[in-house]
Image (spheres, grey):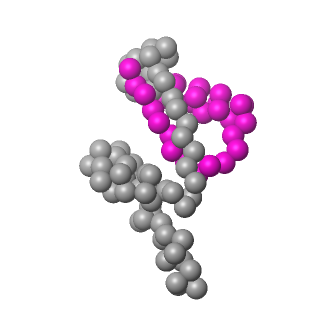
């Protein structure tokens, strides 16, 4: 019963994009995990860039790094206030 949650910078996805993403992920999950397509559920959770560190990077990447099977190639994003100070 895999359940996948995809958190991403909020962007417009067409219904066709969503169908293609669901189809591709479902194929990969069923082939890799040996489950049926009916057992797969996939959720999309758009996140505003300004909220990425607090809602995603710290709780899901930084604190749970040992659970990740692929690490991103970036560190925490600079907070908006820090960006203004650097300018």
Q: Is residue 5 left or right of residue 19?
A: left
Q: Residue at x 44, y 52 (%)?
A: 55
Q: Residue furthest front?
A: 81
Image: 14 above or below 33: below
Residue 65 in view in this figure: no
Q: Kindly indicate the quadrant of the structure image that contains residue 17.
A: top right
The residue lying toward the viewer, choosing from 30 and 53, is: 53
Residue at image x 51%, y 29%?
42
Q: Is residue 64 left or right of residue 55?
A: left
Q: Nearer the viewer, residue 84 or 69?
A: 84
Residue 86 appears at what percent x and percent y?
53, 84
Figure disc tally: 0
Quarter of the figure that contains the C terminus: bottom right
In this rendered view, identify the residue nearer to me: 61 or 49: 49
Q: Which residues are magenta?
A: 1-28
23 part of magenta stretch: yes
User: Quadrant where the N terminus lies?
Assistant: top left
User: Could you say where residue 46 lies in the image, as x and y percent from the top left?
Assistant: 57, 45
Q: Position of residue 5 (x, y in %)?
A: 47, 36
Asked whether residue 25 is drawn in magenta, I would say: yes
Q: Left or right of 67: which side holds 11?
A: right
Say which quarter of the image contains residue 14: top right
Q: Position of residue 38 (x, y in %)?
A: 49, 14
Compared to 24, does 46 lie above or below?
below
Q: Is residue 45 visible?
A: yes
Q: Residue at x 49, y 56 (%)?
A: 52
Q: Quadrant of residue 33?
A: top left
């Amino acid at each position: 019963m895999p359940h996948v949650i995809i958190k991403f910078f909020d962007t417009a996805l067409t219904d066709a994009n969503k169908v293609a993403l669901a189809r591709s992920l479902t194929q990969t999950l069923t082939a890799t995990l040996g489950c049926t397509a009916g057992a797969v559920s996939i959720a999309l959770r758009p996140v505003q860039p300004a909220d990425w560190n607090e809602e995603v990077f710290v709780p899901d990447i930084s604190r749970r790094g040992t659970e990740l099977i692929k690490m991103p190639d970036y560190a925490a994003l600079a907070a908006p206030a820090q960006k203004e100070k650097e300018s």
